[in-house]
Image: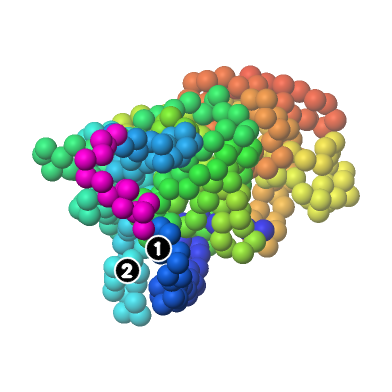
Amino acid sequence: MKLYTGKHLALAATAGAFLALAIGSAILYLPARQSAAPIDARYSQARAPAAQALQVKDAPSAPLDVTAEYSADEQENIGVYERLNEGVVNITTEQLYYNWFSEAVPQEGDSGSGSIIDSQGYVLTNKHVVKDAYKVYVSLADGSRYEAKVVGIDPENDLAVIKFSPPKGVKLTVIPYGDSTRLKVGQKLLAIGNPFGLERTLTRGIVSGIGRPVSQSERDANGATTTVVIQNMIQTDASINPGNSGGPLLNARGEMIGVNTMIYSPSGGSVGIGFAVPVDTAKRVVPELMKNGHVSRGWVDMSSVALFSDLVDYMKQNNIPAPVDAGLLVSQVSRGGNAERAGIRGGSQQVRTRTSSFYVGGDIVVSVNGVNTDSEAQLYVALENTKPGDKVEIVYYRGSKKMTAQVQLSDRDKAGVSE
């Protein structure tokens, strides 16, 4: 099983086109066969009086109740779509690639969706939609296309804010925020996006699960892999496909309760397991992205490595205390930093692996801010909702002794930590 974001499955669009052509041919062929079939003359004569009765010109006409054609549920879906589809934009990008002569060549990059969240042209989308973009374009429902700029990104939640400048007098449809803290499994949801370039497509489903932690990994330009865990994601069976990324997940009232982000699929197509970043996460970080371009978070001034079986075995064989099998081994603490001031110690014996080097013999951190820290990703999770200056409790082992420390967090950006 794999998680898919962005345009991982662009080839599926080609297969979909051939399928659509085959289905379209069948639909066109059937009426032609039916229209050529003979009509029973007696049946036509029997219908004649009734038909004549319907053609009486003086018969009073009652007002047509259009809503009677649709169920209450259908009316709800139609209403949400008609009110808000123009608030969903199609995002396309250009990225720079370098040829054999080291010349920069613009090429088409990722595409996705976004929600207009402000009448001035601010759009909320996913970070992976605009990642490494040389240029970003926004297409509106009327076909107009504008160049946009990336205002800010939050890698830890795969969110980004971009902005375009609508012409004077153009009134934008704004997608309103809802409340993702009150969601219930079974609640109806609607998704609007641009799957495979099919603009402003509506799909529907329910809340399949809440509070899902989902890992997301990506490689940087140097080939290094970074993994983050996005917390409290909304799971839904509303059909989400490549191109839906960044679009809104709406409740029945037409309020955004999530940002569609990824699917879980063995085949590359939607199998009814999609994930969205909860809107309350977006509401918390978007103002800071619009103001500063990034989110300031707290940090513990230490470098660490997650324990793994071979490392634990090595420590035991060399009489280095290893009282637990999972946790963050503190390799070093910054001189004068908050970890050192709180009494946390780094290691003294250097160990080299094929890909890195670190020190053993230091403290082993097992919990930060109430979150178990058995990996670097979990440390980021523990500090995701903190600010510089906040105090957190750190639980760690020194030898076989379990200890706690209160640490006042520093600024992660000033510490030079890459997200």
Residue identifier under label 2? 107
- Can I make out residue 64 in this image? yes
Q: Is residue 42 above or below residue 207?
A: below
Check if residue 76 falls in the magenta segment.
no
- Seen at 55% across and 24% down, the residue is 182
Side of 119 where 31 appears, left or right: right
Q: Secondary structure at mark 1?
A: helix
Q: Which residue is mark 1?
A: 45
Disc 2 crowd, CA 10 A, few/some/many (<14, 14-19, 20+):
few
Inspect the image, locate mark 1, and give the three-letter code of the amino acid beneath it. Gln
Q: Position of residue 307 (x, y in %)?
A: 75, 45
Mark 1 is surrounded, within 10 Å at the Cα level, by few (under 14), some (14 to 19) or many (20 or more) other residues, namely few
In the image, residue 95 lies at what x, y percent? 33, 63
Q: Which residues are magenta?
A: 48-62
- Quadrant (top left/top right/bottom left/bottom right) for the N terminus: bottom right
Q: Is residue 172 left or right of residue 115?
A: left
Q: In the image shown, does 169 or 372 lie closer to the viewer?
A: 169
**Secondary structure beneath disc 2?**
strand
How far from the left and from the top, in percent, is residue 334?
56, 35
Residue 269 appears in which quarter of the rendering? bottom right
Q: Is residue 72 left or right of residue 306?
A: left
Q: Nearer the viewer, residue 242 or 311?
A: 242
Residue at coordinates 20% horizontally, 53% vertically from top-left? 144
Whether residue 53 is in magenta: the answer is: yes
How has the structure been colored for display? rainbow
Examine the rendering and report whether any part of residue 284 can be seen: no
Residue 249 screen position, x and y as percent: 47, 40
Q: Nearer the viewer, residue 150 or 411?
A: 150
**Residue drawn at point x = 53 percent, y = 51 percent:** 239
Comparing labels 2 and 1, the label whose residue is closer to the camera: 1
